[in-house]
Each structure stands twice: as structure tokens, then as C-alpha cells.
Image (cartoon, rainbow, N blue to C red):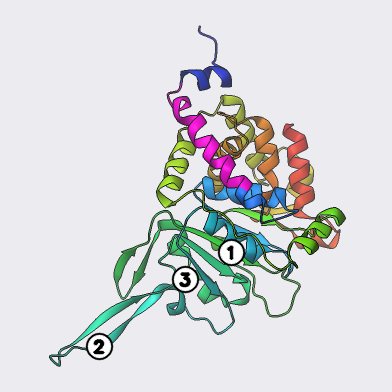
């Protein structure tokens, strides 16, 4: 019986390694360009870029004033994507996002309908404060996020490629917000929590952003190159140890399949198969950003929180005891670590 190949053997035998160095250097250059503008949020930048390189959508969670909007605008510029912004408000309607047909009369007097594209027809859609819109309007993005197309007036219309949604969200305890439907939350490959910066980083931000002029972000990639990077991510080899860690992690968070009594007691529902898909792509993208040709189990642990925190729900009794989803995920990581 032949020995099972390890991760290093997979890398050396895969032809994707031939183009890895070239693509990796471009990704590192893009990461550095974003870091020169977004100060003090290295982990947030890395997780957001990981979500984009994985080909997914990212939800940015944090109180106002932490630079979420600036991060999205900077990423759009550095990645060379056609970027649109929609400010979500309670009176926003689905047609304001998708577009609509209007009746027009030509010079000959003949009338006909013409479709006017909404802001969703772009490569990077910034859904600012997405949870301030009604669930009906939030749901208008479901088809676009999953299928990269929208149906308006009975006709399917393809969206540009690549297509990503970077949504910002205020914490639900703030007034004037609506919870996102679970089906839409699951479409986000990651939920990235944006914290307050540390003291030294906040000092740098105050000085750098209040001068006479700020250096604009530099364009490094474009849409075509980003698609090439995303294709490379899907071709990167993943060892059996990483796949086993992903399966163990997501299955340990389901009350019906976990062997951890504490999780059975507090978890109402756990992550589905889409969480495993997100981790498989995410660990590859994280390794690429870090300059490694294959992911490791450490990448799985590092992405456990942003990939799983919005795909799990706790019983009311668990909330009453002060138990958080983050605590449960940490327990899951320790069980398989």
C-alpha cells in the first residue's frame, strides 16, 4: 500500500505551482497598497481580501466611524473594479438596487420598454448599512449574490464578472436596524468584525487623516487579473489533514452530529455545507496572501470565527447565561486542535 501524500508532495506535483510566484507577488503588492491607506486594521484587511480572493461576499460588522466604507472604496480602487455604492435606508426599494423597465416613446411615436440598470450591475457593490433596509429590500440581493444574475420583468440579466458584495452593518442593538435573513447571511463567505484600533494605531490614524492632503490608493490589479487569481485559488492543492480539520470543525458545531455535550445544549442550529465550502476556499486564499502555495490546519483555525459566527444560532437560554457564539466557536476549535 502506498503512503498517503502530505501537503508538500501535493504542492510539488501540482502544475499550479508554476504560476504561483507570479500571482502571489501581485497579491502581496495589492495587500500592501490597501495597508498604506487603511491603518491599524491589518486583520480586517486580511480577512476581507481573503473573502474576495475566495470569490465570495463579505459582511463588515462594526459601529459607525471605524473606516468600513473607506476600506471598501480602497479595495475597489486597488483591485481596479467598477465600484458602486448603495446607501441602505428604510424606504429603499428592490428596484432601486436591481433596476427597472421604463416606458419610452421614440421619435416615430412608437412606445416601448427600456431597462435601466440599477447599481447592482457592477463588479464591486458596496451595500452601506445593509441592515437599515427592510428585509424585502435586503432579499433583493439574494439572487445576485448566489447566481451572479438578476431577474427583472421576467428576464434573466447577467451581472459583470467578477461580482462581489461588500456590505457594512451596524450592530443590531442600535436603533433603526433590521436583522438580515438567515438565507442571506449564509451567502456571505465571511462576517468580519471591525474593532476599535489600538492606542498607537489610533494616533497614526488621527495624524495621517487630518493633514492637508492624503495619498490616494494606487491601482494594482484589474477585474481580469482578479478572476485569474480566483481561478488559481480554486486550483491550489489542499491536503487531507486540512480537509479533515474543516469537516471536524463544521460538524462539531451541529447539535445533531457533535459529540460535545456543551454544544448540544446551547446551539440551536449549526453551520451547513456552505460553511465547509467557504473554509475550503478561504484557507487557500489566506495561504496565497501569506505567500504559501498550500494551506495548513492553522489557516482553518484562523478563519473559523469569520466563517462560522454568522452561520450559527444559540438557544435563548444560552444568551441568558451570557454565552456568545464566539465562545462556542472557540470551544469547537479547541476540540479539534
Q: Nearer the viewer, residue 224 or 333?
A: 224
Residue 16 lies in the magenta stretch: yes
Q: Which mark is residue 264?
A: none
Where's residue 8, x and y in %? Answer: 57, 19
- Residue beneath label 3, please? 140
- Report the side of 299 relative to 123 (left or right): right
| Residue visible at 69% across and 69% down in the picture | 170
Q: CA distance from mark 2 to mark 3?
A: 25 Å
Q: Nearer the viewer, residue 282 or 253?
A: 282
- Residue beneath label 1, please? 167
> Does the rendering let one see residue 123?
yes
- Residue beneath label 2, please? 104
Q: CA distance from mark 2 to mark 1?
A: 34 Å
First-in-chain label (3 vs 1)? 3
Q: CA distance from mark 3 to mark 1?
A: 14 Å
Where's residue 123, x and y in %? Answer: 44, 60
Tag 3–tag 1 contact (CB < 8 Å)? no
At label 3, counting other C-alpha atoms closer than 10 Å, the crowd grade (few under 14, some 14-19, many 20 or more) is some
Magenta-highlighted residues: 14-32
At label 2, counting other C-alpha atoms closer than 10 Å, the crowd grade (few under 14, some 14-19, many 20 or more) is few
Amino acid at each position: 500500500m502506498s503512503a498517503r501524500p502530505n501537503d508538500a508532495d501535493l504542492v510539488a506535483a501540482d502544475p499550479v505551482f508554476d504560476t504561483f510566484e507570479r500571482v502571489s507577488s501581485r497579491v502581496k503588492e495589492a495587500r500592501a497598497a490597501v495597508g498604506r491607506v487603511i491603518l491599524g486594521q491589518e486583520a480586517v484587511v486580511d480577512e476581507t481580501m481573503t473573502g474576495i480572493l475566495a470569490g465570495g461576499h463579505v459582511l463588515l460588522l462594526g459601529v459607525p466611524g471605524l473606516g468600513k466604507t473607506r476600506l471598501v472604496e480602497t479595495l475597489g480602487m486597488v483591485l481596479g473594479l467598477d465600484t458602486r455604492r448603495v446607501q441602505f435606508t428604510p424606504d429603499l426599494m428592490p428596484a432601486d438596487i436591481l433596476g427597472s423597465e421604463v416606458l419610452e416613446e421614440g421619435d416615430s411615436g412608437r412606445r416601448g420598454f427600456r431597462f435601466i440598470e440599477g447599481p447592482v450591475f457592477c463588479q464591486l457593490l458596496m451595500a452601506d448599512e445593509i441592515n437599515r433596509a427592510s428585509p424585502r429590500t435586503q432579499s433583493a440581493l439574494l439572487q445576485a449574490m448566489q447566481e451572479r444574475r438578476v431577474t427583472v420583468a421576467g428576464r434573466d440579466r447577467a451581472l459583470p464578472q467578477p461580482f462581489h458584495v461588500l456590505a457594512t452593518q451596524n450592530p443590531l442593538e442600535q436603533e433603526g436596524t433590521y436583522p438580515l435573513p438567515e438565507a442571506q447571511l449564509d451567502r456571505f463567505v465571511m462576517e468580519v468584525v471591525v474593532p476599535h484600533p489600538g492606542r498607537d494605531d489610533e494616533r497614526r490614524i488621527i495624524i495621517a487623516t487630518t493633514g492637508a492632503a492624503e495619498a490616494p490608493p494606487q491601482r494594482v490589479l484589474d477585474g481580469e487579473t482578479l478572476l485569474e487569481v480566483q481561478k488559481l485559488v480554486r486550483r491550489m492543492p489542499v491536503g487531507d489533514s486540512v480537509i479533515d480539520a474543516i469537516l471536524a470543525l463544521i460538524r462539531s458545531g451541529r447539535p445533531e452530529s457533535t459529540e460535545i455535550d456543551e454544544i448540544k445544549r446551547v446551539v440551536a442550529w449549526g453551520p451547513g455545507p456552505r460553511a465547509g465550502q467557504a473554509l475550503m476556499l478561504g484557507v487557500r486564499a489566506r495561504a496565497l496572501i501569506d505567500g504559501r502555495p498550500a494551506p495548513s490546519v492553522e489557516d482553518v483555525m484562523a478563519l473559523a470565527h469569520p466563517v462560522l459566527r454568522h452561520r450559527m444560532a444559540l438557544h435563548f437560554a444560552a444568551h441568558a447565561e451570557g454565552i456568545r457564539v464566539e465562545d462556542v466557536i472557540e470551544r469547537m476549535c479547541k476540540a479539534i486542535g
